Amino acid sequence: MALMFLSPDDPAELWRDELRARMPELEVRIWPEVGDPAEIELALVWRPPPGELARYPNLKAILSLGAGIEGLIADPTLPEVPVARMVDPSLTSTMAEYVLLAVLRHHRGFDRFERAQRERRWEFSLPPQPGDRQVGIMGLGELGAAAARLLLAHRFPVAGWSRTPKAIDGVTSYAGHSELHAFLHRAEILVCLLPLTAETRSILDAETLNGLPHGAMLINVARGAHLVEDDLLAALDSGHLAGATLDVFKDEPLPPDNPLWQHPKVLITPHVASYSVPAIAAAGVVDNIRRAQAGQPLNHQVDRQRGY
Ligand code: NDP
Ligand code: OXD
């Protein structure tokens, strides 16, 4: 069975070696050196060019190197084979770590101290206790739930908002559109970890941001298209929001003339919130390869209708 590896951002040779260490009989072909397309039965991909996967007539499954698969399934030529998204312990722990870091940076006022330092201002102020700072997480799936648990361990009160109610120890669960307002109302730091779907596109708009308490902060680590950038800029400039940490953008790389770059209340990171370590993630991928070979349902199979 031959697997095609295609990713502009991941270390292809490392992935090949980690997969073959666990499955020596697997032939890994690194795109674009894939040989006869008819011999490719599996594709392990991140952001393949639209139309590319339609070239492989014997594809049995598509395994995504990313957790977010909205770009993949938006391709109208995508073959009708099972698609699995990435769920792996390294992706989950690096995301939880990033969210904790960003929450602590806002909570402890490092964002304000960075601004004050640039102006040589001694801005003495002490933050509340973590127990007095409410964090809200939109999306309580694999990544949102892990971030929630890590924040709880650091004594932040955490609420989550999801499509269906969740029972996670210590996390207050809100679900569905009817509970969104109540969820937002208490979120002094809002973290977005939703998948990008027709329902969640532009969800971080003026109405949502205005539903947060005065002085709230936003952390968007999901997708750039969740956020209406002009509405965020307006909320920051009016003082309603005190800061934002943004890892994802509608256009990546973020164009040099985008006003977010210069905004004093915004921290930008280049889509690095979480990442899979091949030595850790390969085991789950091999498990799914064996499932595909055996004609079994994949782990973490995407529901294409639902969009995640
Ligand atoms: P999951 O599929 O495990 O979780 C998604 C969560 O979002 C679920 O709790 C789901 O609710 C909820 N949700 C989906 N649609 C809605 C809706 N319409 N209203 C309310 N809640 C909704 O995804 P992951 O946690 O694995 O990943 C989340 C996203 O994080 C990815 O899709 C990707 O965009 C982003 N990401 C970003 C990375 C980065 O480096 N910046 C890295 C990895 C991922 P329910 O369970 O009830 O269906
Ligand atoms: C992902 C990502 O979806 O890196 O895994 O954004």
Image: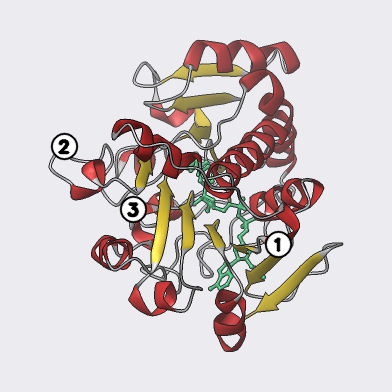
Q: Which mark is residue 132?
A: 1
Say left or right for 22 vs 244: right
The residue nearer to you, when weighing 250 against 65, is 250
Marks 2 and 3, the one that precedes in the sequence? 3
Select label 1 or label 3 by which is in front: 1
Q: Secondary structure at mark 1?
A: helix
* Residue at the far right in the pictured view: 169
Say left or right for 140 vs 35: right
Tell me the crowding category of disc 1: few under 14, some 14 to 19, or many 20 or more residues within 10 angstroms, Cα based.
Answer: few
Q: Is mark 1 within 8 Å of ligand 1?
A: no
Tell me the crowding category of disc 3: few under 14, some 14 to 19, or many 20 or more residues within 10 angstroms, Cα based.
Answer: some
Marks 1 and 3, the one that precedes in the sequence? 3
Q: Which mark is residue 256?
A: 2
The residue nearer to you, when weighing 218 against 300, is 218
The residue nearer to you, when weighing 136 against 65, is 136
Q: Which residue is mark 3?
A: 77
Q: What type is the residue that disc 1 sits on?
A: Asp
Q: What type is the residue that disc 3 sits on?
A: Thr
Residue 255 x/y as whole percent: 18, 40
Work out how far the residue at label 2 is from the one at label 3, CA to CA, in angstroms: 33 Å
- Which residue is depicted at the point 24% across and 41% down? 261
Residue 117 x/y as whole percent: 37, 32
Residue 144 versus residue 64 in the image, above or below: below
Select label 2 or label 3 by which is in front: 2
Select label 2 or label 1 by which is in front: 1
Residue 3 x/y as whole percent: 54, 26
Q: Name the image colouring.
A: secondary structure
